[in-house]
Amino acid sequence: MYNTLLTELTNGILTITINRPDKLNALNKEVFADLNKVLDEVYSNKHIQSAIITGAGSKAFVAGADITEFNGLTIEQGKALAKAGQDTFFRIENSPKPVVACVNGFALGGGCELVMSCHFRVASDNAKFGQPEVNLGLIPGYGGTQRLVQLIGKGRAMELLISAAMIDAATAFNYGLVNYVVTQEELINKAKSILTIINTKAPLAVAACITSANAVFNETQNGYNVEINEFGKCFGTADMKEGTTAFLEKRKANFSGK
Ligand code: COA
């Protein structure tokens, strides 16, 4: 079904593995096409409640955009490349279903940008993060200059962006870039155990939290107004009636996603 991805759906969680381990899972055009295809699936398949993105092998999550595809591009082609990458990562960020990054090694350049577009991150203790683009005479183009500042603050982000320094998993945890650091063996199970809990919550309310929290960083929207709207919309859902009724009846809610 995909040339560059492996997928496995278990208990409502789709695990997406970027599968070019001999190239440290670098993001080429084919990977982007497959990511867009799998995102269509995440958005539309009602059996998928949430997703994990990880990299094949034990060395890298994703070591960046595929540098071999940069050669000979014009300024306009460079802009188009960045726009296409940003569009894909916006689809991850705005997915109504939670998408968690399991960072199992190098997450550099576009790999770090991919990780940051996910809703939150779990890392293995060998993970390394960085935006090394200035080594190539480039800058991050898939949202990295924006999301790194959002996630770890301007001072730390600026230093990483302009020095191309790599940080280890412990530092990423300290900076708030990742929520957990576990062993490689525990990595996927850690994310699955969190998603298993999230998957029991009201899906439309989960999606409304994502929409509202993302609005903080969207200059075209007032986040408080988005929250008012999303909060109000919950009152029109069967799940809100079920959730509040179940609480009052002292039983577990059984959500339908409606
Ligand atoms: N694009 C294309 N190919 C890449 C790549 C990338 N971003 N990152 C790694 N690869 C390829 C290497 O060219 C090599 O391919 P080869 O075996 O055909 O020569 C293979 O993946 C293994 O990488 P290698 O560099 O030999 O591994 P290493 O252990 O010596 O170094 C890294 C690991 C991550 C430090 C190093 O690969 C690296 O610096 N990668 C580029 C990181 C980067 O600049 N990313 C931002 C891109 S915008």
Image (cartoon, helix red, strand yellow):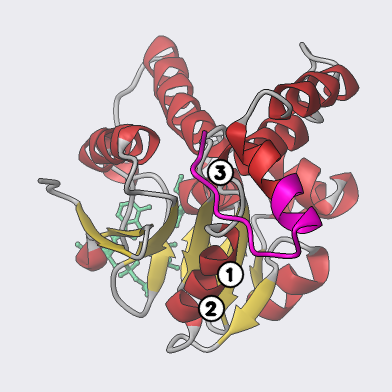
The tag on residue 56 is none
Where residue 13 appears, x then y in whole percent? 39, 60
Q: Residue at x 37, y 58 (%)?
A: 12
Q: Nearer the viewer, mark 1 or mark 3?
A: 3
Q: Does dot 3 land on a helix, a strand or a loop?
A: helix
Q: Is residue 145 visible?
A: no
Residue 220 among magenta residues: no
Residue 170: x percent and y percent?
Answer: 71, 80
- In space, the residues marked 3 and 2 are separated at their CA atoms by 21 Å
Q: Evaluate if marks 2 and 1 touch, with contact meaning CB atoms under 8 Å apart.
A: yes
> Dots 1 and 3: beta carbons under 8 Å?
no
Q: Is residue 247 magenta?
A: yes
Q: From this viewpoint, which residue is outermost toward the front? A: 249
**Counting residues from the N terminus, which is met first, the one under dot 1 or under dot 3?**
1
- Residue type indicated by callout 2: Lys
- In the rendered structure, which amino acid carries the disc numbered 3? Pro
Using the image, tell me which numbered label, if any, was put on residue 190. Answer: 2
Image coordinates of residue 176 in percent, x first then y, are 78, 63
Near mark 2 (Cα within 10 A), the count class, few <14, some 14-19 or many ≥20, is: some
Q: Which residue is mark 3?
A: 203
- Whether residue 142 is visible to the viewer of this picture, yes or no, is yes
Q: Position of residue 154 (x, y in %)?
A: 86, 44
SS class of the residue under badge 2? Answer: helix
- Mark 1 nearby-residue class (10 Å; few <14, some 14–19, many ≥20): few
Who's the residue at 80% across and 17% down the image? 219
Q: Which mark is residue 194?
A: 1
Foreground tag (2 vs 1): 1
Q: Nearer the viewer, residue 104 or 207?
A: 207
Main SS, magenta region, reads loop
